[in-house]
Structure formats: C-alpha cells, structure tokens
Image: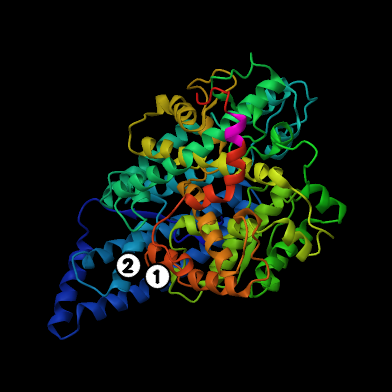
Amino acid sequence: MGRAIAILSAAIVTVGCEPDPAVDVIQDAGTARAAEGRSITAEAEAFVKELEARLLETWIAEERAAWVKATYITHDTDILAARASERVMGVVGEMIDRASRYDDVELPPKLRRKLDLLILGLDMASPDDAESRREIAELEAWLESTYGKGKYCPENNEGECLILHDLSVILAESRDYDELLDAWTGWRTISPPMRDKYARFVELNNKGAQCLGFADLGQLWRSRYDMSPAAFQVELERLWEQVAPMYEQLHCHVRAELAERYGEERVPLDKPIPAHLLGNMWAQDWSHIFDLVAPEKENAFDLTALLEKQGFDERKMVRQAESFFVSLGLEPLPETFWVRSMFARPADREVVCHASAWNVDWKDDLRIKMCIDITEDEFVTIHHELGHLYYARSYKDQPPLFTDSANDGFHEAIGDVVALSVTPKYLVQAGLAKSEPEVGLNGLMRRSLDKIAFLPFGLVVDRWRWDVFGEKVKPGRYNAHWWKLREQYQGIAPPVPRTEADFDPGAKYHVPANVPYTRYFLAAILQFQFHRALCRIAGHEGPLHTCSIYGSEEAGERLDAMMSLGASRPWPEALEVLTGEEQMDATAIVDYFQPLLDWLEEQNAERKCGW
C-alpha cells in the first residue's frame, strides 16, 4: 500500500511534553470568544476546517516527494523526501497542540472522531525539537532507501551482484539446498547496518508517542481500532485461535513433503521447518513449493503458463485486473493512472520495487508502483493494489480526516477479496480460458500455501515491534526475539545460526519502512468474511471456493457502499454494511478451505504434527 492510501501513515508528528504557552493564548482567546456568544462547537468546527486544509496541502507535497524518492532513489531525492516529512511534522505537531484545547469538550461525534483520528492515524512521532525532527526524518529516509538499494554480491559470481528480485527467483525456483541457503543468507547481509539506526528510530518515536499520552509507539498503533489497545490484543488472540489448528495441519503436511525431498536430517519431522526451503524470502508465502506438496500430481493448473501463452505484458496484466472492478459496476481508472504509474523496473536508476498503491492528491491522481513479472503471484498482487485505489476513490469525497478505510485491515482486504474470485469460472468469463480447468484439491492447496501459510507471519512482525517499542526487548536481543516469535507462531527456524551481529527483521521491507503489519493479518481474515458475504449477495450456490463475483453489479454496489464510508464510522458499522455482521470472524476462511482441511487431516493421521 502506498503512503497516501493510509491517513497520515507517512506523517511524523512532533509535540512537546511541556505545556505550550501558545495553547494558553488560544484558551484565553477561546474564552473571550465564548463570552461573546460563539459556541465551542462552532469554534472547533472552524479549527477542523483549517486543520484539514493545511494537512491536505502538506500531505500532497510529501506524497509527491515520496513518489520521486521511491521511483528514483538518489542522495538528493532522499533529502527532498526527508525535508517534506519535516514540513509535515511541523504542521501536524502544531495542530495537535491546538487540538488539545478540545480534549475535554463534548463535541458532535463526527467532529470528535476527526480530532481522535488526527493522532490515531500516526505511524511515527518525534519529540518537539528541531534536531529530533530532522534526525527522525533522515532516519526514515535512510532506512527505506537502504532496503531499496540492497544487493548481495557473491564471491563466486564474477563481481555480479544480485538484487532482491534475483534472490527471490532462486528461492522460488531452485530445489538445491545449498543454493537456497546462499540466496537466503545473502539477502540478510543488507540489514545489519540498519540495527543501530533502527534502535535510535525507536527511541525517538517512543519519546514522541509518550508526549501524546501513549506508553510507546506500539500502544499508539494498537489504539486505532475503535477499542482499547488491550481489547485489540485479545481480539487478535481470538482470531488466531480460530485459525491456528488449520495452519498446524498445513505445516505438518508441508514439513513431511519437504523431508521427503531434502531428507529428514535436514528437515526433522518434529522440529521447525528451515526457513529457506519454503519458496519465499521470509517464508510468508509457500506457493512456490506447490509442486512438492500438491495433492494431485497430474492436475496442476498453471495460471502463469496461461498468462504467458496469451502474451500478457505488464500493462495487459493491469488492464485485466481493472476489468474485474469494472465488471462490478465501478468506473475505469483515470487516464493519468496509465501515464504516471511505474509498471516495470527502469533500467537506468534505483527504485523501490515493493508493490504499492498511491493516491497522490487524495482525489484522482491514482498510481501503482511495481516491477511486474508475468506470474500468477503478480496477477494477484495487481488486483490487491488496484483494490487500494478503488477503495480510495470510493471515499475521495469524504473530508480529509476520513479519507481512509474503516480500519487498515479493510484496505488490505479489498483487493484480495477480488483476487479470491480468480476462479476457473472467472477465467472463462474473462476470456482467459476456453473451458473451465479442472483444479480439484490442487487449487485449494495452491491458495492455502499463500493464505493459510501467511497467517502467523501476519502476527509476528508487529508482535516483535510491539515488544521492541515497549522496551521488553532491548537492541541486544533484537534478532533472538525475532526468531523466538517465528518459531513460536510459524514453526520456522533459521537454516544457519543467527547472532546479534545480524538484524534479520530489517530484511523485511515493512520494518525499515515503518509500515504497521497487523493490517495484513486482519486482511487475511476479513477478505474471506467479505468474500462469503459478497458471494451470498451475488447469488452463488455451491462450495465457497468455487465462487466468483465477477460481473455481479449487486456485489459491486454493496462493496462500494461500504468503501464510500471511508473512516467516517467505526469499523464494526462498516463491516455490518457489507456483511451484516459486526464482529470479525475467521470461520469464513475455514469454510473456504474445508475440503482441503479434510484431506490434510487424513494425510496427517499417522504423522507427528507440531514443533
């Protein structure tokens, strides 16, 4: 997701821990105005109008600088982006100080919600001094750019260096244990220099969060879900308990098949799985090892081969994804999208290839940034990124402080729920296939290696950060704690010993880029809940995994009704608009994969599962 999609996600706020004399002046002036007959509500409304106008102006300027930095990484663009962040800091910090006048004032619900979102939408906070403000902005730019410029230069590669894309291809395609190990460890050579700077980044952010009244930055992040931070953590545990047994069944089968391929001495049947054998740099998506674990060896439908056969290029991939949203009754993307987006890696400069969606002007300047390969994974990712854009366009007429999703998991789920409709039926409807391919259990297995395999990783990234922000884990234990959580939740272990000379969390984009990650776990739950509801609206009959909402304007109308609310209402109300339910519910993902789960339980009946 791009910076402009999430409210204030790139903004850094600076606030003072000491009382600001300027606030006293404002309070005195407010008292005088009240005595003259102006209500505090009218005063607050005028303030919020000014607030939103100034925020929008600075957000757009920062977004443009961030786009240039992400698509043209240089020393100068890093500096320009950092300076734009500094300007946002000043405006947001000033506005939060001024908004404190209304902390204990009874205001209309929408006005109060806007003032709350001013703080709760923040991903970063800095203490109120110019030196800290500049330092944190420069740290942010440096960490993200260091990741974007990361390369591994093997000694035996004749001086040729490998970027993340190259190393990811090796992990996806190779079945050579040592080659996989070299690619896995090679990428993690980029992150040790980040450790000290990241620790300082945490220190500064925590000081800023404390000035806002939070214990640390993690507590601020957990406060944005229309419930207390403690209640939100309980909610996450409830959802995880619903899906953990399903994950354990998949883990058990995959481990057994990997042991068959690589030998039990390398993949013990009662231990965590070595992280480099799962086809993905972070072991968050196992779909690239489908050939090793497929239930039906002679029935492996290959969408990648189909796309290549039909001559798909980067733009045709995006056009196809756009056509899905149009089939739901939504408008095509603006022409500027096709002119201003980045679809392929440029040959002449460094860029951040990590896929993201951008709404540069908070209205119609919609873009995506990707280095697209013609693969099934990228096909799904494009649907995901366009989902962000269609969501943003649906709520574009909301006031600026409401231009976001009901919660950040909603934003991530929208594109994915469309991708769930990439079924054999859809392939025929869209003209991608002449007849419906028989996929059987293989289709569910392939998708489970993406969706089910991801679930614990979706929790681990922020569990680690929340412990770091909360100072439960000091810099001297960063790496050890990372792997403790990965083993606990994922049943994954590093293939070689790791020490505190390493900084493996920094090898995952969302850590150096400071992008909250729990949203992806929530999205993994919500997309199936959305899918089940939309399939009912579309009149689908049959197993949930066979449903495609392609072409259903009724489903599109209900989806748009929810998206158009933006952040103007608490998320349970938005969820009810779409699904008729007020609570997040993981039973939908279990319903979707039930035929595969039945098969997995049979396969695992004689196996020792767990780790």
* Residue 34 percent across, percent down from the top left: 15, 80
Question: As drawn, is 403 to the left or to the right of 19?
Answer: right
Type of amino acid under label 2: Arg
Q: Which residue is mark 1?
A: 568
Residues drawn in magenta? 600-604
Is residue 239 visible in the rendered structure shown here? Answer: yes
Taking the spot 58% from the left edge, 29% from the top edge, the residue there is 604
Residue 114 sits in which quadrant?
A: bottom left
Q: CA distance from mark 1 to mark 2?
A: 8 Å
Residue located farthest toward the bottom when viewing the structure as drawn: 37
Question: As drawn, is 226 to the left or to the right of 594?
Answer: left
SS state under label 2: helix
Residue 179 sits in which quadrant?
A: top right
Question: As drawn, is 446 to the left or to the right of 397?
Answer: right
Of mark 1 and mark 2, the one earlier in the sequence is 2
416 or 3: nearer the viewer: 416
SS state under label 1: loop
Instruction: Check if mark 1's residue and mark 2's residue have beta carbons within 8 Å.
Output: yes
Query: Which label belongs to residue 113?
Result: 2
Is residue 461 visible in the rendered structure shown here? Answer: no
* Residue 276 percent across, percent down from the top left: 64, 27
Residue located farthest toward the top when viewing the structure as drawn: 265
* Residue 87 percent across, percent down from the top left: 44, 59
Type of amino acid under label 1: Ser
Taking the spot 52% from the left edge, 45% from the top edge, the residue there is 513
Check the image and report above or below for 454 versus 303.
above
Query: Which label belongs to residue 432?
Result: none
Residue 470 sits in which quadrant?
A: top left
Taking the spot 36% from the left edge, 39% from the top edge, the residue there is 469
